[in-house]
Image (cartoon, grey):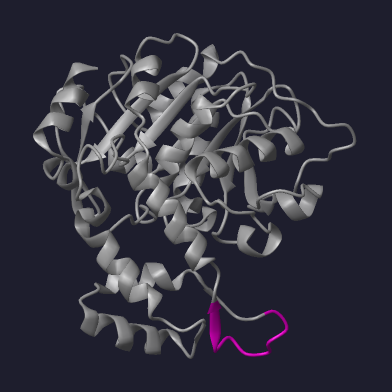
Amino acid sequence: APMVPLPLCTLRRMVTGVGVGGVGCRVDGLSQFRLCKLVSPWCQFSASSLASAAPTLTAPVVVPPGRRPPPAGWTPVLHSHDVKTIAAQAQQFGTDATFWSEHTRTIAILHGLFGSGRNWRSVGSALGKALAERDTQHSWRVVLVDQRCHGASTQAYDAPAPHTLDASAEDVADFFEKSGIEPDILLGHSLGGKVALAYLDGDKRVLPKCTFVLDSAPFSKHDFPDLGNLHGTFSTLNVLRELPDVVPSRKWLHDTLAPRGMSVDLINWLGTNLVAPEGQGSPEPMVWQWNFAGCESLFQSYVDTCHWETLTRSANSSDASAELVIAQRTFDDWPANQKARLSSL
């Protein structure tokens, strides 16, 4: 499935015990993943390997005045704390510190194209629990961001054009500044991975100690002209462009998309973007919780943008490292010159 997040697994199950050599493992029987290259010398990628970095994190988290801890469970930061930027939800793990304490560390997650923070709740919970169990010196909060033109941010934040990776990274930086949340670990998948790299390129930003880029191509269409249609992404966009703004039912969505060659898993995942209009008494019909034109522009920016230089700088940085994890199927489709460039880092 093109550009699809990984809501069905935790990172512990996704890549566990994988060495730098690139041994593969299964992900819910759907696809093969391997760790093709670590830009900085971590030996494993898993929830526990993330946790192992936690005691070395030193950047304090800002404690906004008058803030109170949110209740248990995923809490909308936008609604709870009047943060007038992109929407996000957060949950704290560990009981030794309040949500806004300087002893609370943060991992922020950026979803992929047509995704939302909600897709990452199970992954975020697994990571938060693993980090809190491993790092007894701090509590951990997991922040799931809805990027511009996606999820709750579509209604909460009227994002101005142009819709680019840099603009989305600036949104994320503004969210961190306005909310008082500073990322110790930043994790981005696919589109979100390149937004994370764009965030590292910005000026006057609090940089995370570690950035994890999951299944993102660091090169551009100038390096690989068919990048935009890797695994049929452009074809999927063409089908989605034909859909109406109001969808009668989920069954209608399945009956419409299945004959176009889309899998049940992909259709069900796309359906997570459907919501009932505000004030409607029944669950159907539904509307899309995305700005489709804005999403298309973000994807165009994805294929237009190269981030090899960012990864190269991170490989030589002791302050803000970046880790790159690539799906086996995706890596197999990379052009030989880009595989060689990855190996040279």
Q: Main secondary structure of the magenta part?
A: loop
Give the residue at x 35% y 43%: 304
Q: Which quadrant of the structure image shows residue 18?
A: top left
Please give left or right for residue 35 compared with residue 104 in the image: left
Q: Is residue 6 above or below residue 319?
A: below
Tell me if residue 116 is in the magenta stretch: no
On screen, residue 175 above or below 149: above
**Range shown magenta:** 278-287
- Position of the N terminus, as image quadrant, is bottom left
Q: How many discs appear?
A: 0
Where's residue 230, x and y in %? 21, 53
Location of residue 345 in the rendering, given as x and y in whole percent from the top left corner: 24, 17
At x 62% / y 22%, what residue is drawn?
Answer: 206
* Residue 47 visible in the picture: no
Residue 174, x across and y down, in percent: 68, 38
Q: Nearer the viewer, residue 38 or 58?
A: 38
**Residue 241 visible to the viewer:** yes
Q: Is residue 6 left or right of residue 292?
A: left
Location of residue 331 in the rendering, given as x and y in whole percent from the top left corner: 17, 40
Query: Nearest the camera: 320 or 8?
Result: 320
Q: Say whether residue 318 is left or right of residue 220.
A: right
Q: Does the magenta-highlighted stretch encompass residue 280?
A: yes
Residue occupying image coordinates x 46% and y 84%: 244
Q: Nearer the viewer, residue 301 or 247?
A: 301
Residue drawn at (36%, 30%) of the image: 307
Viewed as shown, does residue 157 lie left or right of 263? right
Query: As drawn, which residue projects farthest toward the right?
Result: 66
